[in-house]
Image (cartoon, rainbow, N blue to C red):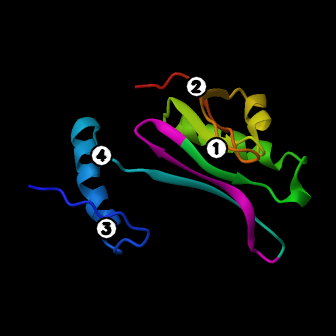
Amino acid sequence: MRAKYEPTENPAPDAFGKIFSPLKAFNEQAVGPAAARIFAILLKNEADEVVGGLWARSLWGSFYIDMLFVPETLRRAGVGTSMLRQAEQEAIRRRCGHIWTDTYTFQARPFYEKFGFTVFGQLDGPAPIFPRFFLKKDLEARSS
């Protein structure tokens, strides 16, 4: 087979799946089913509208926090702390060995470090966005 390269900013709608499906099959053959499970905590206002929250997923013994957002009016009131602790308890319940996330320099690195997360990686780039930090926290030993 000869490869033809086609760089694009507008791929066909099915292109992602055509790349992802064989990659997923390859990964699953090596390490088992790739059944990511979502975990979300939704913060709602009086009108029952989502105004913030936490979104995470577990896969292969790892628990990743995709995003955590607390509206300005609720900050410094323990809301972020509560969500992070709930996420950690869920990760333990799911028997994950660690919990991890990433954050930019202008975001929440000190917040995560306050709860025992440590930096395991960093991407540098132009200010004010970068550096981007990758943080993790090892969890209680998993039971078999």
Q: Residue furthest bottom?
A: 47
Q: Which residue is mark 2?
A: 138
Q: Which is closer to the viewer, label 1 or label 2?
A: 2
57 in the magenta segment: yes
Judged left or right of residue 71, residue 42 is left
Q: Which residue is mark 3?
A: 15
| Between 28 and 141, the one nearer to me in the picture | 28
| Residue 29 quadrant | top left
Nearest to the eye among marks 3 and 1: give it.
3
- Return the residue found at the far top: 141
Give the image location of residue 95, x and y in percent: 48, 34
Q: Which quadrant holds the N terminus?
A: bottom left
Of the two numbered discs 3 and 1 on the same chain, state the one appearing first in sequence. 3
* Residue highlighted by disc 1: 87
The percent coordinates of residue 31 (x first, y second) are 28, 36
**In the rendered image of this protein, does residue 53 appear above or below residue 101?**
below
Q: In the image shown, does 132 or 95 lie closer to the viewer?
A: 132
Q: Nearer the viewer, mark 3 or mark 2?
A: 3
